Image: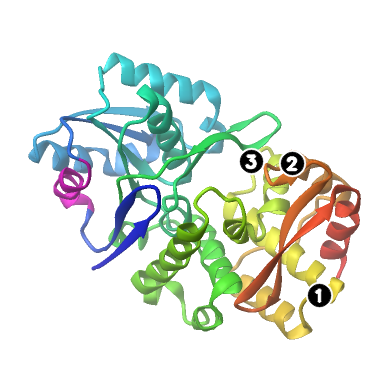
């Protein structure tokens, strides 16, 4: 069992270990208090874990309710968000009650954004049920929904009251969902910790608690310096600019982890082409992605990816901020003129 404390605009704990879900009520009582608990989840997680979570909350005196929506990125939209807010109104939740996000990144982002907006802010707790959510989206307070023009274009920075990560759930994930999370784990090694990166040659599943904890520690340290992404926190977006473009082009049929893997491969090849990193760095990055069965190529042409990137929230006028590796364990931010983006992506696709 590991407990990692995050100190941002709100200080909270991330608890990582076995068998946490069935003790969630006790943890949440200590983390957030409250009388009512509204669980926000998708139909897959509801069937797998909804009753267990609700029973645990009831044991600690909570009145529980559940809002369930169809699984998938297509639910991360304003219609679902407004429906959740109306549900909370119908359930008469107050500012002293809580929301509980049960699931992967989509339930976490939706519940977090609803918590930030409902009555101008209610406490919420994240319970990630995917590896990707455990190491990334459940930590740091980013909440959002997608708009027709791009991913995560409406949202808020709103820190949870706690995160409960039950690794016994994560170890039973379907292979394709598990691989998505591995992409984000590899990202953390590339941007911040070369020793951790090379330790991933040993399968993540054999070191799951330690790997999740290390990713969380890296993100905690970065968020502690830049909670609202005005500077250093942007380093966490390695692979995400092109990756989000690929997701958008596929109408979100390409999963986030796979899209980010393609984005990291594009950024690494472009960095090598620009002379920012050496051949060994590039080969190590591509080799690690391939070791985990993650894609390093895409069929989308540079022109279409660049066009899709123009709606990226990291764009500042005629510039867009991208992350490039200098060596394994160290990356840099560079503002790229929008006029050069297509050529840069083309280098990332062709090398």
For disc 3, the marked residue is 252
**Foreground tag (1 vs 3):** 1
Location of residue 272 with respect to 98 vertically, above or below = below
Compared across the picture, whether 28 is left or right of 111 comes to left
Looking at this view, name the residue that lies furthest to the top: 90
Residue drawn at (80%, 53%) of the image: 299
Q: At numbered mark 2, what does the secondary structure look like: helix, strand or loop? A: helix
Compared across the picture, whether 78 is left or right of 305 comes to left
Compared across the picture, whether 28 is left or right of 148 comes to left
Stretch in magenta: 21-32
Number of residue marks: 3
How far apart are the alpha carbons under marks 1 and 2?
Answer: 26 Å
Can residue 13 be found in the magenta stretch? no
Residue drawn at (87%, 65%) of the image: 350
- Residue 103 is tagged as none
Q: At numbered mark 3, what does the secondary structure look like: helix, strand or loop? A: loop
The reply to whether residue 64 is in sight is yes
How far apart are the alpha carbons under marks 3 and 2?
Answer: 7 Å
What crowding class fits label 2: few (fewer than 14 Cα within 10 Å), some (14-19), or many (20 or more)?
some
For disc 1, the marked residue is 272
**Foreground tag (1 vs 2):** 1
């Amino acid at each position: 069992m590991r407990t990692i404390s995050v100190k941002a605009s709100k200080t909270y704990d991330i608890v990582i270990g076995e068998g946490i879900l069935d003790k969630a009520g006790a943890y949440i009582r200590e983390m957030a208090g409250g009388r009512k608990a509204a669980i926000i989840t998708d139909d897959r997680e509801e069937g797998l874990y909804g009753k267990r979570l609700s029973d645990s909350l009831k044991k600690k005196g909570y009145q529980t309710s559940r809002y369930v929506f169809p699984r998938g990125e297509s639910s991360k939209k304003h219609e679902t968000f407004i429906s959740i807010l109306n549900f909370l109104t119908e359930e008469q939740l107050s500012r002293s009650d809580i929301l509980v996000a049960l699931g992967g990144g989509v339930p976490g982002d939706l519940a977090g954004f609803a918590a930030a907006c409902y009555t101008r802010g209610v406490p919420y707790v994240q319970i990630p049920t995917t590896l990707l959510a455990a190491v990334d989206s459940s930590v740091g307070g980013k909440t959002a929904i997608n708009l027709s023009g791009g991913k995560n274009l409406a949202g808020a920075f709103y820190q949870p009251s706690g995160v409960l990560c039950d690794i016994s759930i994560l170890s039973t994930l379907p292979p394709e969902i598990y691989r998505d999370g591995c992409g984000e784990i590899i990202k953390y090694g590339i941007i911040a910790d070369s020793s951790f990166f090379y330790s991933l040659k040993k399968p993540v599943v054999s070191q799951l608690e330690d790997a999740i904890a290390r990713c969380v520690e890296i993100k905690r340290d970065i968020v502690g310096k830049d909670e609202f992404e005005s500077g250093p926190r942007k380093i966490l977006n390695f692979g995400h600019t092109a990756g989000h473009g690929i997701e958008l082009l596929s109408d979100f049929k390409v999963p986030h982890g796979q899209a980010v893997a393609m984005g990291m491969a594009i950024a690494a090849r472009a960095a090598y082409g620009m002379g920012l990193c050496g051949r060994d760095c590039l080969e190590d990055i591509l080799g690690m992605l391939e070791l985990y069965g993650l894609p390093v190529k895409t069929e989308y042409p540079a022109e279409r990816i660049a066009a899709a990137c123009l709606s990226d929230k990291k764009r500042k006028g005629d510039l867009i901020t991208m992350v490039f590796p200098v060596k394994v364990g160290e990356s840099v931010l560079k503002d790229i003129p929008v006029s050069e983006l297509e050529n840069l992506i083309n280098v990332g696709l062709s090398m």
